[in-house]
Amino acid sequence: MTEPLTCYLVDDELHAHHILSKFISRVSYLRLLGQSVDPFEGLEQIQELKPDILFLDVEMPDMSGVALLKMLPMPHPVVVMVTASPHHAAETYNFESVTHYLLKPVGYDKFMEAINRVTKRLGYTAHSPATDTARPTVTGEPAPLPAGQPTSIDPRERVPYFLIKEDKKLIRVAPEDIVFVEGMKDYLKLHLTTRMLVTHMTMSKMEEMLAPSQFLRINRSYIVRRQAIREIDGNLITTLDGKKVPIGVTYREAVMKELKKNMI
């Protein structure tokens, strides 16, 4: 039987990890070896794991995808560049290893177009009749996994830190530094263990970034880190720093269901 093609993903956006890892999991001849939001960590792991295919974001705050490729020793894996802007295509195609270019938001049809081009370049033939038979819905979401097929680990569980923009600075924030997040229209207040940080971001975007096992949306305007909850009194949660945050009426049933998992 033909061995599966191994993949590695480097992207500073968690949504890209979520989508691409789901797409990879639905192709029987692809296997995800690892992924990272940190290009420096990714550079080390690519050299160690030696994947067949590298999905690489072009624009990252600490190191661009182009810079990573310049630092990556030869031979390179086959590279699929991923970006929100088409203006970097010319520069990335200077690398012989770059085979395709995916524009965010990535749809399943474009993803498979990239995979088909990669397999052709590698001379790889998949011998599974189930290959690429599952099609996504109209919205671009993949079809459900067949019964018994393992799901990939949520990449948000592995994120060591975020780079949050405040004014013109990028501030490193670890998930465990966050006590709770407070929404203010298009801005957020991140109440951290040592300070408060204000950033231009929506609550839905922040909720998308945070691991559900670590954080809980309790209100339209509040997300609380589970381990930062000190007590619950009626509809009020008191955090470890003594702040009181309300549980929304429409959120209460779901919130209490989650919190009761830890009751004894």
Image (cartoon, rainbow, N blue to C red):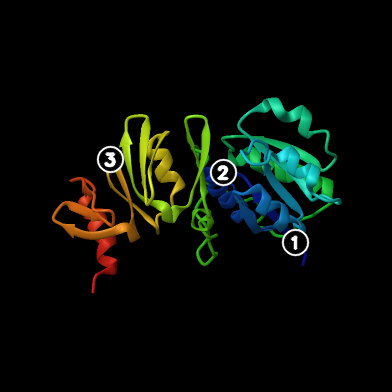
x and y, in percent, of residue 74 in the image: 86, 50
Q: Nearer the viewer, residue 82 or 132?
A: 82
Looking at the rendering, which quadrant does residue 127 occupy?
A: bottom right
Q: Nearer the viewer, residue 81 or 227?
A: 227
Q: What amino acid is at disc 1?
A: Glu
First in sequence: mark 3 vs mark 1:
1
Question: Element type at marker 3?
Answer: loop
Classify residue 49 as left or right of residue 146: right
First in sequence: mark 3 vs mark 2:
2
> Which is closer to the viewer, label 1 or label 2?
1
x and y, in percent, of residue 255 in the image: 26, 55
Tag 1: Cα neighbours inside 10 Å, few (<14), some, or many (≥20)? few
x and y, in percent, of residue 82 in the image: 66, 38
Q: Which mark is residue 48?
A: 1
Q: Which mark is residue 16?
A: 2
Q: Which mark is residue 220?
A: 3
Residue shown at 64%/58% (left/top)? Answer: 34
